[in-house]
Amino acid sequence: MLHAKRTHPPSQEYELTEDGRALTAFSLRRGRVGARFTLRGVKYAVRTHRFSGVYELLDTGGTVLASTDRVSRSWTMTSSGRTVLFRQSAAAGREYTMTGHDGEPAGTIRRTGHIHSEVTADLPGLDLLLQVFALVVVLLRRRRKRAAAAVRSSSLAGG
């Protein structure tokens, strides 16, 4: 099970552990590169496509290893010809359920902690790299939604 926790709220820096052991750290960034992390000595980046809501996992050479379609209430992640479906299973994107080939729930990604500053991913059957990617995608989507809400409230207030 993966667990991501903000290191110093309200920063966007997270520490990621697997079953209590330190795994990696990453920072959610603005712009095209949404996050960078190192896993097992290899560097990766998560690229965001601002207007389409699509995310891509890149290796150091810029090769796309995995991608999502538009991340919303339901979305898919594709890697090496395998497609995994995620569906929102709690209000406000607090939980996504990974669906197995039989259509039954096979895992979850859940935002927890004080002001939802932590995320837990239990995604059995997925490669560790893809688990990390899915978890980062959920965090980036949350940040994107919060930024959009701030813009809307600012424009409604006349500012």
Image (cartoon, helix red, strand yellow):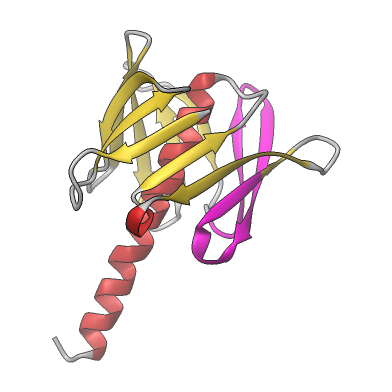
Q: Which residues are magenta?
A: 72-97
Q: Is residue 8 left or right of residue 114?
A: left
Please state the horizontal and vertical placement of residue 144, each as a whole percent of the image: 35, 58
Look at the image and say whether residue 158 sits in the magenta stretch: no
Q: Is residue 67 left or right of residue 59?
A: right
Residue 132, picture quadrant = top left
Residue 126, picture quadrant = top right
Q: Main secondary structure of the magenta part?
A: strand
Please state the horizontal and vertical placement of residue 28, each as a whole percent of the image: 27, 42
Q: Which quarter of the rendering shows the C terminus?
A: bottom left
**How many marks overall?**
0
Q: Residue furthest top?
A: 41
* Residue 85 sits above or below residue 24 on the image: below
Q: Is residue 97 left or right of residue 72?
A: right
* Residue 12 sits above or below residue 154 on the image: above
Q: Residue furthest left?
A: 159
Which of the two residues, 113 or 87, is positioned nearer the viewer here?
113
Which of the two residues, 62 or 45, is positioned nearer the viewer here?
45
Residue drawn at the location 41% of the way across and 39% of the way down: 136
Residue drawn at the location 33% of the way across and 73% of the way down: 149
Please state the horizontal and vertical placement of residue 33, each as a whole percent of the image: 28, 38
Residue 24, picture quadrant = top left
Residue drawn at the location 33% of the way across and 50% of the way down: 117
Residue drawn at the location 39% of the way across and 56% of the way down: 142
Q: Is residue 121 left or right of residue 4?
A: right
Q: Residue furthest right?
A: 102
